[in-house]
Amino acid sequence: MAARGVFITFEGIDGVGKSTQIKLLAERLRSDGHAPCLTREPGGSTGAEEIRNLLVQGDPGRWSGETECLLFTAARRDHLEKTILPALEAGKIVLCDRFADSTRVYQGLARGDLRALVDRLHAQFIGREPDLTFILDMAPEAALHRGLARGSGEDRFEEMGLPFQHRLRAGFQAIAHEYPERCRLIDAARAPEIIAAEIAALTAAYIAAQAPA
Ligand code: TYD
């Protein structure tokens, strides 16, 4: 039987602590003998990283919602082909910072009413959902403060303001209800080690449930 990996994504509003949690889960998996593949969107492959620069830098009004959908989908397709699917075929656990749920929420909901377009593009060009999705949830006031404090120069979406971040938070909560079988809503306002322990336990439970009896 072909090796089958596990595809895990992390989602949430800007500044919610996804990258810290990915790092902590990766450390935990390595200590359990796994060799996880860490990746991110937009980006995660050479071509998609080039598209990323077009998306995260520059004026907040640079692209229409429709153009953004196309650019994110193009980046995701390259990422899927070059990074995610090869790692899953090699039997790896893939930990991905954002995936299609971000497009559903950022472009599909919060930037306008484009969910039908997002769904059509996803069905046609991506057609793959994660096995497990951790949605990190916290108040935008606290998250935005953390995100902008990083001063990364990649703040195009953070600069869209607090009401936008509130729409995003509600959008991610709705995704957790829409896809209850793969999504786990995580209270991200707690201490990082407490959150990490919950995520590690949920991941271990998923992996154990997949193991052949
Ligand atoms: P990311 O690097 O994850 O930023 P952060 O670390 O601040 O969360 O993502 C860059 C930005 O791109 C982020 O503000 C969310 C946005 N984004 C979308 O609008 N749609 C998408 O499909 C994805 C993957 C990201």
Image (cartoon, rainbow, N blue to C red):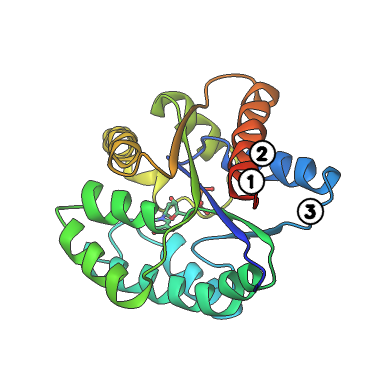
- Residue placed farthest to the front in the image? 213
- Judge by depth and name the residue closer to the eye, 167 or 84: 84
- Quarter of image, res 86: bottom right
Tell me the number on the disc at residue 207.
Answer: 1
* Mark 2 → mark 3, Cα distance in angstroms: 12 Å
Three-letter residue code for mark 2: Ala
- Judge by depth and name the residue closer to the eye, 134 or 56: 134
- Quarter of image, res 63: bottom left
Q: Which secondary structure, mark 2?
A: helix
* Mark 1 → mark 3, Cα distance in angstroms: 12 Å
Where residue 68 sits: x, y (%)? 31, 66
Pointer 2 local density, CA inside 10 Å: few below 14, some 14–19, many at least 20: few
Three-letter residue code for mark 3: His
Q: Residue at x 29, y 67 (%)?
A: 69
Disc 2 target residue:
204
Disc 3 target residue:
34
Do the CB atoms of the residues marked 2 and 1 lie less than 8 Å apart?
yes
Please give left or right for residue 195 compared with residue 28 in the image.
left
